[in-house]
Amino acid sequence: MKIATWNVNSLKVRQQHVIDWLELSHADVLCLQELKMPDEKFPRAELADKGYRSWFAGQKTYNGVAILVRDGIEVDETQVVRNIPGFEDEQQRVIALTAGGARIVSAYFPNGQAPGTDKFAYKLRWLEALQQWLKDELQAHPKLALLGDYNIAPEDRDVHDPKAWEGQNLVSPEERAAFANLVELGLIDVFRKFDQPEKAFSWWDYRMLAFRRNAGLRIDHILLSPALAEGCTLCEVDKTPRKWDQPSDHAPVIAQLA
DNA sequence: ATGGCCGGAGAGTCCGGA
């Protein structure tokens, strides 16, 4: 089973990119973030035509997450969860379901804006709630995958210019500690289990010709529980759609599971 | 040169993103 994650920065604008990339990648499960649309606008029928069922949690303008599952992959309809249970939040950032025997979590982590701001405090609270929930979720579902836009570059090698970024939002010690807490639960950043290009990123600013200069960050991740990581044979960033016309600023990340 | 690009909302020399 191939599982993937992609922050599309508006599904309305990127709908055709998603359809084209599903055909290109043959992903079985695709987690999406930043839909930026209410549920009634979600292109469920168009994706169904292409052979994918959709589960989503959207809202107007901001945030919004989805999981697309290829026809033929079994989904347990009774186990769909939206948002972090017990964490009161207007913002639609989490959806989880069980597909092909694996617990799949699609998450859009808060951006945080800058250390010291209210939004940064919210990011840390959200991260703490996520970790607490996943601790229970792992007990119930030993085969678990956490995919999404983490808005955290876990190490300096995930940053094009670590010196310029030192202490900034997305790389600060507090955020990296929160990422380490997820790893502490047993989750594995499978991207690092395989050989990768020296400067491998998943996001590039629209400005400053950042993509052309490869001035990016690796902030989109696939973390797997040991039971899933064991059978994982590949994990990579696919930069292809970042080169298409009117691209998302993020590229998809894909992993091959047993 | 601390900006530059986007998408969305909706007409705010806007905001949020990362």
Image (spheres, coloured by chain):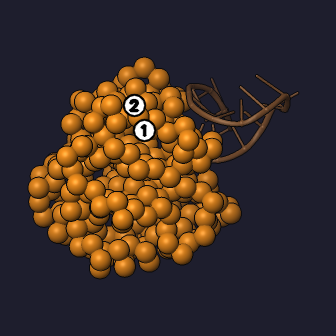
The percent coordinates of residue A106 (x first, y second) are 39, 55
Q: How many marks?
A: 2
Q: Which chain is orange?
A: A
**In front of the other: A192 or A93:** A93
**In front of the other: A129 or B3:** A129
Q: Which residue is mark 1?
A: A44
Q: Give the color of chain B as drawn.
A: brown
Do the residues under discs 2 and 1 have CB atoms within 8 angstroms?
A: yes
In the visual, does A205 lie left or right of A61?
left
Q: Which residue is mark 2?
A: A46
In the visual, does A73 lie left or right of A184?
left
- Give the amino acid type for the residue marked by disc 1 in the picture: Arg
The percent coordinates of residue A163 (x first, y second) are 46, 50
Residue in view at x 50 percent, y 28 percent: A13
In the visual, does A1 lie left or right of A199?
left
Question: Is residue A170 visible in this depiction of the protein?
Answer: no
Q: Is residue A55 above or below residue A132?
A: above
